[in-house]
Image (cartoon, rainbow, N blue to C red):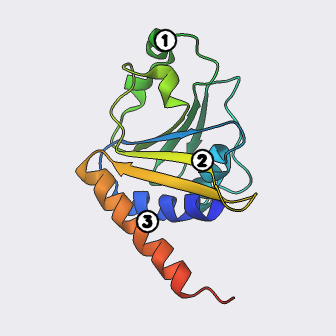
């Protein structure tokens, strides 16, 4: 999941220009925060991602990008999203990575890229990812991510 996050971080930083919203769906322990850690690593932010389960928003900053990692797991109602001030975060140099977006359904900005993670049906430690672009910027990021993954697979030695 961290490698996918790194590839996503590279793809998004190359495709950015306006605020970029990524939603991450998946069960507890599926790897959402690990994926965010990979994005952070790609952007030059060392160490693991800090889970915003209790703070709800964890900000990070690089020279080129402001990143906001949101975890909506604790929200009881989508109307609580407004109190978080997410609209104020939607600046051209911002990237929002939103875990548990279903908890804010109808109150969140549209996702440029939606990622659903689930446990693989084969292999105890594997994951299956479904990614959907919701905008032209999301499509560019998805294409960049797919190119990176294909490159990694072509250079894999077994």
State the count of labels.
Answer: 3
Q: Which residue is drawn at 29% across and 52% down?
A: 137
Give the label on residue 92, or none.
none
Q: Kindly report which numbered mark, 1 or 2, lies closer to the viewer in this rendering.
A: 2
Q: Examine the rendering and report whether any part of residue 1 can be seen.
A: no
Taking the view exactly as shown, the residue that stands out farthest to the left is: 136
What residue sits right under mark 3 in the picture?
145
| Circle nearer the N terminus (3, 2) | 2
| Picture coordinates of residue 71, whole percent (x, y) | 60, 30
Q: Distance between the residues labelled 3 and 1?
A: 33 Å
| Quadrant where the image shows the N terminus | bottom right
Q: Examine the rendering and report whether any part of residue 157 can be seen.
A: yes
Secondary structure beneath disc 2? strand
Q: Residue at x 49, y 72 (%)?
A: 149
Give the label on residue 83, or none.
1
Asked if residue 29 lies left or right of residue 23, the reply is right
Estimate how packed mark 2 is, as few (under 14), some (14 to 19) or many (20 or more) residues with alpha carbons within 10 Å. some
Secondary structure beneath disc 1? helix
Q: How far apart are marks 3 and 2 (CA)?
A: 19 Å
Quarter of the figure with residue 93:
top left
Q: How far apart are marks 1 and 2 (CA)?
A: 30 Å
| 137 is higher (above) or lower (below) than 19 | below
| Circle nearer the N terminus (3, 1) | 1
Quarter of the figure with residue 45:
bottom right
Of residues 39 and 146, which is closer to you in this image? 146
| Circle nearer the N terminus (1, 2) | 1
What residue sits right under mark 2 in the picture?
118
Q: Residue at x 30, y 44 (%)?
A: 134
Estimate how packed mark 1 is, as few (under 14), some (14 to 19) or many (20 or more) residues with alpha carbons within 10 Å. few
Secondary structure beneath disc 3? helix
């Amino acid at each position: 999941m961290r490698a996918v996050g790194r590839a996503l971080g590279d793809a998004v930083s190359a495709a950015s220009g306006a605020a970029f919203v990524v939603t991450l769906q998946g069960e507890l322990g599926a790897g959402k925060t690990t994926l965010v850690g990979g994005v952070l690593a790609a952007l030059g932010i060392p160490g693991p991602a800090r889970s915003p389960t209790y703070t709800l928003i964890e900000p990070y900053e690089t020279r080129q990008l402001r990143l906001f990692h949101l975890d909506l797991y604790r929200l009881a109602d989508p109307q609580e999203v407004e109190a978080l001030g997410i609209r104020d975060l939607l600046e051209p140099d911002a990237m929002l990575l939103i875990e548990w977006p279903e908890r804010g359904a109808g109150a969140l900005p549209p996702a440029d890229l939606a990622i659903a993670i689930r446990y693989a049906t084969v292999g105890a430690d594997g994951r299956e990812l479904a990614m959907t672009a919701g905008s032209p910027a999301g499509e560019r990021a998805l294409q960049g991510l797919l190119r990176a993954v294909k490159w990694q697979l072509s250079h894999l030695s077994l």
